[in-house]
Amino acid sequence: MGKREPIRMVTFFLVVTAIQVIDFAIRHRLGFAISQKSISTFVTDAVDYGALLMFAVLGILAIITILNSERQTPRYAMPVMLAYLILASIGVAMNLGVLIGSNNLRHEKVVSLIILVALFYLSTTLMFSLWYQLANSYLKGGAIVFPPNAAHPNDPPRWFDYCFLSFNSNSTFGPTVEEITTRPAKAIMMVQVSISITILIVAIARISSAAH
């Protein structure tokens, strides 16, 4: 079993804040691609409002943690963190659906498409870093074994280590030196790699079409 450290609420909230900002930028860029209101847009709006509500609750929990001088996240915050990540993941999937299916994006400039794809990659990297951290912190026996830190062998993994794992999964379609030990964590990585490959394929197709 690898070393584990309880999730720090403030760090978690800061990463979630970055995800929200990036998601807003993605939604703003994709807004023109949705020509009319439909059931899918109403569902997307509902998911966004749900994620925003969970974001607000996480902010309150982060403030409580600071006021109580707690370094780790209280156990009762876990359902809220899980709910947010589920809603955020659904939101990413729906935004990706717009990226794939919208005909309006065919006339978008190459630079704009590259920025949009970069935002998707950044969003998924941050989001899945929290998924891995949540899985490793709360699954029985942990979920991920990290190689020891040469400078500090007893130092448990921090959020940046999970971000590094998520970045590698996005860029190389799998872990490099980390060992994934549980099925839920493997399922999470399969979802991330599937999204990453889809974004790459769509990006190549969209950018190639825009260039011509």
Image: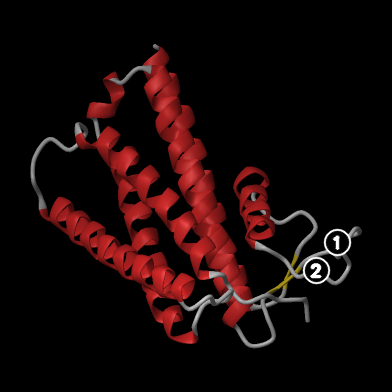
Residue 104, image x, y percentages: 22, 28
The quadrant of the rendering that contains the C terminus is top left
Specify the farthest residue to the right.
Answer: 150
Residue of label 2: 155
Secondary structure of the residue carrying numbered label 2: loop
Q: Callout 2 environment at 10 Å: few (<14), some (14 to 19), or many (20+)?
A: few
Residue 1, image x, y percentages: 78, 81
Amino acid type for the residue under numbered disc 2: Asp
Left-right relation of 181 to 127:
right
Task: Choose top left, top right, bottom left or bottom right for residue 24.
Answer: top left
Q: Which of marks 1 and 2 is nearer the N terminus?
A: 1
Q: Does residue 26 lie above or below 141 as drawn?
A: above
Q: Which residue occupies the foreground of this view, 122 or 193?
A: 122
Q: Callout 1 environment at 10 Å: few (<14), some (14 to 19), or many (20+)?
A: few
Assess whether mark 2 and mark 1 are in contact (beta carbons under 8 angstroms): yes
Specify the farthest residue to the top.
Answer: 212
Q: Which residue occupies the foreground of this view, 74 or 35?
A: 74
Residue 154, image x, y percentages: 85, 72
Residue 135, image x, y percentages: 58, 74
The residue shown at (53%, 59%) is 128
Q: How far apart are marks 1 and 2 (CA)?
A: 7 Å
The residue shown at (18%, 61%) is 46
Amino acid type for the residue under numbered disc 1: Asn
The residue shown at (41%, 75%) is 64
Left-right relation of 140 to 150:
left
Inspect this view and state whether residue 194 appears: no
Secondary structure of the residue carrying numbered label 1: loop
The residue shown at (54%, 77%) is 70
Residue of label 1: 149
Inspect this view and state whether residue 66 appears: yes
